[in-house]
Image: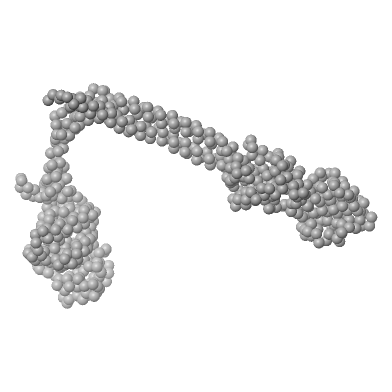
């Protein structure tokens, strides 16, 4: 056909748009693939590096800050101990008449040796001031005021060395009072006012990175020492922020904390208490500086991820452009093969995987006819056979030949179905059967059994054939219990609609000949044997809610399933009466588990119960109330 006018112009445009859409699709898929192959590993690697780098850097910063804070705390302890030791020399000798001048000389010598001491007061054993020397006040000697109630005197006498709280001269310069008692009570107490500005030497020597430093605060959070002395001279300004920082660090002892300082700058901080004087040394480093190396590593990782993304995008576009032509040819060939043109062949000579793919398409076209025919045959078989049987019939020639095998057959059918079908409308009958078949089919599939046939309201189920299963007797009984429960639930729903029906099951076990029977136009898979026939007869005898089993099944399952021994019955097709057994919810009085030879037996090996009485008892609410009939 020759296209003219608008149709001739629109066809190339449609092909172009379709090809463009294909290329875009390929570009996206290749980009996703390359992104996963290139960018995703880079991203995951960057995340892992960032996590482990952050953890290692945090550990390193914590150790560094703790080391510096501990070092400063130890040096402050040493500073306080040194002053206490020096004060101890001033109270070595007891007070005697005329010893004031000697004690004054000792005090003046102490002022020269310890620049941090601003003034010294010597108190005798009665708590009276005897000598007072100072750098800024006049010295005085002789009996002065009574200081026996002074906290410094009381504390020194109690603990030998007493450290007072920090106080500030003119609300700016920090001072502390230290009192030391002599080893002899007669030596009295030496009280010194110490200028704490000299602790600045200890703090200013601490450098953590480029801008990290240490500070010292007292119990109230007021600043005692800072590398910037002007911060200390500000007095109480900022003490609330320092107290907040101190309390936050005390909640995580031995660890560093990322928080903000008084300038609202994000810092990493660690604290060490100075126990003797009740101070806290806080080491600080700006978080930006502490994690600078980690931030640089993240920027490098981000650059690599960006480069990888651009590379994946460019490579995806190039590959999509190269593959769009052969793919279009493969697409056209696949469409023709999909329409059933199995004689069509795709001709690609690219010499790569696409050519091999085209060859596979061609092979697929040759195999599709055979595969379609085989699928149609299996589908037809599954309409008449169980799925397992249909697959084996198609794939195994051995199954077509009869062979012997020990099988367990389960027969089940509805009670009262004939009366129901005689009075109900066809649509209601079909609906009830459909519900019944769905329940039965679900239970059979759950227990991996083989459904041999549906015959109206009756079903025949086979275990251990054609597929062998472990412990087929137990599996058959569990299947029957499950099936009885499900169908009884369904029968309850039917009864509410006015359709009263019951359900009975028979189970038999024994050798049987299994295989396909029939004629050329129709084959059925079945089992023929005495155990199969007996299962069918037991199903006929079973009342509503009953599960009757033969002796072979009872002996197999009696140890795990309650089995009741019933009266002997004459069964059609079998010579003489046969002993019957039933699955019950519990062991009724007067009954015993069949085959349990280890338990002491009554005088009569099995007290019989006739079918009618057992059927009535099985329908009762409490199975333990069953009363066996006399033999």
Quadrant location of the N terminus in the rendered image: top left
Q: What colouring does the structure picture have?
A: one colour
Classify 167 as above or below 15: below
* Along the line of sight, the residue nearer the viewer: 60 or 625: 60
In the image, is 385 to the left or to the right of 239? Answer: left
Q: Residue at x 78, y 52 (%)?
A: 177
Quadrant location of the C terminus in the rendered image: bottom left
Q: Residue furthest right?
A: 98
Classify 596 as above or below 46: below
Q: Residue at x 82, y 53 (%)?
A: 191
Say if residue 291 shows up in the picture.
Answer: yes
* Along the line of sight, the residue nearer the viewer: 160 or 193: 193
- Residue 4: percent from left, percent from top: 15, 24
Q: Residue at x 32, y 27 (%)?
A: 319
In the image, is 593 to the left or to the right of 109? Answer: left
* Along the line of sight, the residue nearer the viewer: 487 or 210: 210
- Residue 627: percent from left, percent from top: 21, 76
In the image, is 482 to the left or to the right of 65? Answer: left
Classify 441 as above or below 270: below
């Amino acid at each position: 056909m020759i296209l003219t006018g608008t149709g001739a112009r629109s066809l190339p445009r449609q092909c172009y748009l379709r090809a463009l859409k294909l290329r875009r699709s390929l570009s996206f898929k290749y980009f996703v693939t390359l992104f996963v192959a290139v960018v995703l590993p880079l991203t995951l690697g960057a995340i892992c590096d960032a996590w482990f780098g952050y953890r290692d850097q945090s550990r390193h910063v914590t150790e560094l800050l703790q080391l510096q804070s501990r070092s400063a705390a130890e040096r402050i302890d040493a500073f306080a101990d040194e002053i206490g030791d020096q004060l101890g020399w001033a109270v070595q000798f007891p007070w005697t008449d005329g010893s004031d001048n000697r004690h004054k000389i000792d005090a003046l010598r102490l002022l020269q040796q310890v620049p941090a001491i601003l003034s010294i007061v010597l108190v005798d054993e009665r708590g009276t001031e005897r000598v007072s020397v100072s750098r800024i006040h006049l010295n005085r000697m002789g009996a002065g005021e009574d200081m026996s109630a002074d906290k410094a005197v009381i504390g020194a006498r109690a603990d030998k060395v007493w450290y007072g709280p920090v106080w500030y001269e003119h609300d700016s310069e920090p001072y502390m009072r230290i009192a030391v008692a002599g080893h002899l009570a007669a030596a009295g107490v030496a009280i010194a006012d110490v200028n704490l500005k000299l602790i600045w030497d200890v703090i200013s020597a601490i450098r953590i990175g480029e801008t990290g430093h240490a500070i010292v605060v007292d119990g109230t959070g007021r600043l005692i020492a800072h590398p910037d002395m002007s911060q200390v001279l500000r007095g109480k300004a900022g003490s609330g922020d320092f107290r907040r920082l101190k309390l936050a660090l005390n909640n995580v002892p031995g660890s560093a904390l990322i928080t903000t300082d008084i300038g609202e700058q994000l810092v990493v901080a660690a604290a060490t208490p100075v126990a003797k004087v009740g101070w806290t040394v806080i080491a600080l480093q700006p978080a930006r500086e502490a994690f600078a190396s980690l931030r640089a590593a993240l920027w490098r990782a981000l650059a690599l991820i960006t480069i990888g993304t651009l590379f994946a995008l460019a490579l995806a576009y190039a590959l999509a452009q190269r593959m769009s032509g052969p793919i279009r040819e493969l697409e056209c060939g696949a469409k023709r093969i999909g329409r059933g043109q199995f004689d069509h062949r795709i001709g690609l000579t690219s010499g790569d995987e696409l050519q091999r793919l085209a060859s596979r398409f061609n092979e697929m076209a040759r195999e599709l006819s055979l595969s379609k025919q085989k699928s149609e045959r299996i589908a037809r078989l599954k309409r008449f056979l169980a799925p397992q049987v249909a697959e084996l019939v198609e794939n195994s020639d051995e199954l077509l030949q009869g062979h012997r095998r020990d099988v367990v057959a389960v027969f089940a059918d509805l009670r009262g179905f004939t009366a129901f079908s005689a009075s109900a409308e066809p649509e209601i009958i079909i609906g009830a059967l459909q519900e019944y078949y769905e329940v039965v089919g679900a239970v059979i599939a759950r227990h991996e059994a083989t459904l041999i046939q549906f015959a109206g309201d009756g079903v025949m189920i086979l275990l251990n054939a054609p597929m062998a299963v472990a412990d087929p007797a137990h599996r058959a009984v569990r299947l029957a219990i499950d099936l009885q429960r499900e169908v009884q639930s369904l029968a309850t729903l039917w009864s509410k609609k006015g359709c009263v029906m019951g359900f009975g099951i028979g189970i038999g076990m024994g050798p049987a000949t299994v295989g396909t029977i029939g004629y050329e136009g129709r084959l059925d898979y079945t089992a023929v044997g005495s155990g199969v026939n007996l299962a069918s007869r037991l199903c006929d005898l079973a009342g509503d809610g009953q599960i009757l089993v033969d002796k072979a099944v009872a002996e197999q399952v009696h140890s795990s399933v309650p089995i009741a021994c019933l009266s002997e019955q004459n069964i059609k097709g079998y010579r003489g009466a046969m002993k019957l057994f039933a699955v019950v919810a519990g062991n009724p009085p007067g009954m015993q588990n069949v085959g349990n030879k280890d338990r002491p037996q009554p005088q009569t090996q099995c007290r019989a119960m006739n079918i009618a009485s057992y059927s009535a008892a099985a329908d009762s609410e409490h199975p333990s109330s069953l009363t066996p009939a006399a033999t």
